[in-house]
Image (cartoon, grey):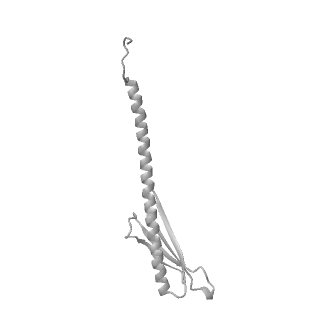
Amino acid sequence: MIDGYKKGLTTVELLVTLFIASAFILAGHQLYTQVLLRGTESNRMANASMAAYKYMRKYQNDVKTTKSICSPETLVSNQPVSDSDLPDGKLTVTVKCPMTAASISDIHLVTSTITYKKSSSGTESVSHAGYIR
């Protein structure tokens, strides 16, 4: 054995190893945070889409049973959506008349739009539309 030489890790080698390990841990945490955020946004968008579709079908049935001649109007404007977990969810439902000829004036275009707050800044909107006669 050479004088002054000992087996094992030096302090510098240990510090370099800890630095590299901490870099991997930080990168993994950032990746996890982004995946979690994207998952939350996707879940909110899916819930908003399902709710918008449900309300579109509901109001299509209401229009079908109550209106024979199409007249454009806003049925619901910025009504809070209470049956979903959307933060500040607001529902707007409109009826439009895409066809003006007398023979097809009974066609209605029902559009439902849900606007909600994103987990990051800003808002997001999801719309569904369908024709009814």
The quarter of the picture where the C terminus appears is bottom right
Which residue is situated farthest in the top direction here?
3
Q: Is residue 42 above or below residue 55?
A: above
Q: In this view of the protein, can residue 119 be seen by the observer?
A: no
Q: In this view of the protein, can residue 47 be seen by the observer?
A: yes
| Residue that appears at 51% across and 71% down | 128
Choose top left, top right, bottom left or bottom right for residue 106.
Answer: bottom right
The quarter of the picture where the N terminus appears is top left
Percent position (x, y) of residue 64? 50, 84
| Residue that appears at 40% across and 40% down | 25
Q: Is residue 32 above or below residue 88?
A: above
Q: Is residue 33 above or below residue 49?
A: above
| Residue that appears at 43% across and 61% down | 43
Relative to residue 84, is residue 107 drawn left or right?
A: right
- In terms of depth relative to the viewer, which is nearer, 24 or 67? 24
Percent position (x, y) of residue 118? 44, 59
Which residue is situated farthest in the right direction here?
101
Percent position (x, y) of residue 78? 44, 71
| Residue that appears at 53% across and 88% down | 68
Numbered-mark total? 0
